């Protein structure tokens, strides 16, 4: 794990919302709390939460119905898992492999966990 | 919008601001940071029309603030760090005395905020702790519902749960038509609340940028090794906090304390970086 990296707050909020979608707490086509409500809940600047929502909308995890609010996309869960896989392969795995190398471990040492 | 145009101010021979330009737009919670005695309170007073600039202007919605027109005065409220409170007064009396001057004030909002902050509006100020007095004043200030709200060291004296309440209430309070300016040196209390961030020093503005822009230009690394090329680094549990020039390293979480120290120590680098 790359412990030196700390994501910006708007991404941390996005991660929390994504976790709720993957766990099934927030379902497909369900309406999200408003930007304002999330901001009040967390005590953060509403503009930060606006960025979170824009970020999730760009990733097509949520969609906007003008004047009504934001809703969970039908395939949000799959999209999130695909993003997680990509992040794991590109960031977490290389760090993990590097650490194994540093500790003198090889992939054979992982066989017992299969 | 609040505009400081070529603004200069001095107390007798001591210059506080020299020819500075700043703008505060609507729908934002600005953080005004600076070391003790650099003029944070002076700036808030000048914006409120309590001080006359030596040169330049302070303009709020096209009105010169020092002209103190009624339409200007009813659109702005400044809560100083310390307010002399009459012993026999209570929060509700204090609010009722101010309310007639502010057309958008709301008694309902005052009651709601008092309740949220767990203060009794009918209790005498002299029977309250400093923190409870501070919370009462915050409830009054917010419920006056002005377009411009200036808070000088608002978290001074608040206990830990009240600081979280303060953040929640402020994020609830800021609408698209409001501008809030918080001057503070207790940056941890307002860490995810303030955006944009303004850092001032003797006579000048060192930084005026949104959090998005700051994390675009600077990278905050937590818990790594100390880096020689860091603008600022300090020890933290698990390693060092390094504030680095962001050369395509992506986005990171801002540390306002780290930012503050990096800006104070690298004024010209920061100026070129944030043009």
Image (tube, coloured by chain):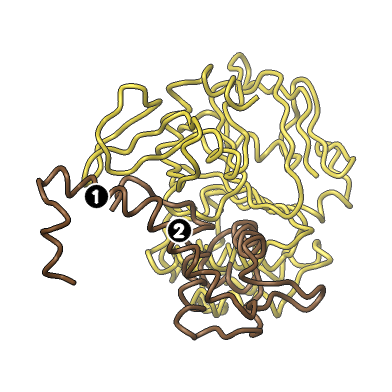
Chain colours: A brown, B yellow
Residue occupying image coordinates x 62% and y 22%: B11
Toward which corner of the image does residue A27 lie, by quadrant? Answer: bottom right
Toward which corner of the image does residue B171 lie, by quadrant? Answer: bottom right
* Quadrant of the frame with the C terminus of chain B: top right
Residue occupying image coordinates x 56% and y 79%: B122
Toward which corner of the image does residue A88 lie, by quadrant? Answer: bottom left
Tell which subunit mark 2 falls on: A
Q: CA distance from mark 1 to mark 2?
A: 16 Å
Front residue of B48/A35: it is: A35
Front residue of B115/B34: it is: B34
Whether residue A25 is visible, yes or no, is: yes
From the viewer's perspective, tell me whether residue A105 is left or right of residue A91.
left
What x and y, as percent, mark residue A64?
74, 72
Q: How many numbered marks have been drawn onto this rendered protein structure?
A: 2
From the viewer's perspective, tell me whether residue B116 is left or right of residue A85.
right
Tell which subunit mark 1 falls on: A
Mark 1 closeness class: few <14, some 14–19, many ≥20 residues within 10 Å: some
Mark 2 closeness class: few <14, some 14–19, many ≥20 residues within 10 Å: few
From the viewer's perspective, tell me whether residue B105 is left or right of residue B182.
right
Which labelled disc corresponds to residue A97?
Answer: 1
Residue occupying image coordinates x 24% and y 34%: B225
What x and y, as percent, mark residue B174?
68, 61
What x and y, as percent, mark residue B100?
80, 67
* Quadrant of the frame with the N terminus of chain B: top right
Query: Of label 1 and label 2, which has the lower sequence position?
Result: 2
What x and y, as percent, mark residue A48?
60, 57
**Helix or strand or loop: what does disc 2 sit on?**
helix
Which labelled disc corresponds to residue A86?
Answer: 2
Front residue of B208/B239: it is: B239
* Labels 1 and 2 touching (C-beta < 8 A): no
Which labelled disc corresponds to residue B224?
Answer: none
């Amino acid at each position: 794990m790359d412990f030196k990296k700390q994501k910006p707050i708007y991404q941390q909020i996005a991660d929390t919302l994504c976790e709720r979608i993957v766990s099934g707490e927030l379902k497909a086509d369900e309406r999200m709390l408003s930007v304002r409500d999330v901001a009040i809940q967390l005590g953060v600047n509403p503009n930060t939460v606006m960025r979170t929502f824009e970020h999730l909308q760009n990733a097509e995890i949520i969609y906007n119905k003008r004047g009504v609010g934001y809703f969970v996309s039908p395939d949000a869960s799959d999209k999130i898992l695909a993003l997680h896989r990509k992040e794991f392969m590109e960031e977490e795995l290389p760090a993990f492999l590097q650490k194994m190398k540093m500790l003198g471990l090889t992939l054979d040492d992982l066989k017992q966990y299969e | 919008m609040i505009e400081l145009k070529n603004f200069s101010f001095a107390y007798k021979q001591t210059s506080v601001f020299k020819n500075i330009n700043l703008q505060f737009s609507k729908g934002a919670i600005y953080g005004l940071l600076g070391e003790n005695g650099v003029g944070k309170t002076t700036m808030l007073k000048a914006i409120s029309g309590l001080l006359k600039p030596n040169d330049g202007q302070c303009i709020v919605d096209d009105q010169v603030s020092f002209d103190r027109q009624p339409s200007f005065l009813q659109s702005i409220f400044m809560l100083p760090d310390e307010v002399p409170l009459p012993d026999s007064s209570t929060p509700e009396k204090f609010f009722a005395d101010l309310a007639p001057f502010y057309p958008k004030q709301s008694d309902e909002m005052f009651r709601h905020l008092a309740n949220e902050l767990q203060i009794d509006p009918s209790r005498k100020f002299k029977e309250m702790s400093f923190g409870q007095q501070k919370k009462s004043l915050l409830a009054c200030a917010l419920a006056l519902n002005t377009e411009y709200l200036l808070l000088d060291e608002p978290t001074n004296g608040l206990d830990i749960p009240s600081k979280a309440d303060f953040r929640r209430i402020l994020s609830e309070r800021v609408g698209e038509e409001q501008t809030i300016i918080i001057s503070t040196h207790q940056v941890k209390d307002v860490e995810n609340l303030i955006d944009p961030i303004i850092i001032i020093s003797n006579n000048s503005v060192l930084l005026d940028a949104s959090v998005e822009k700051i994390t675009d230009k600077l990278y905050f690394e937590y818990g790594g090794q100390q880096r020689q090329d860091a603008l600022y680094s300090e020890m933290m549990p698990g390693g060092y906090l390094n504030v680095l020039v962001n050369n395509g390293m992506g986005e990171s979480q801002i540390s306002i304390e780290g930012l503050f120290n990096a800006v104070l120590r690298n004024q010209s680098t920061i100026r070129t970086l944030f043009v």
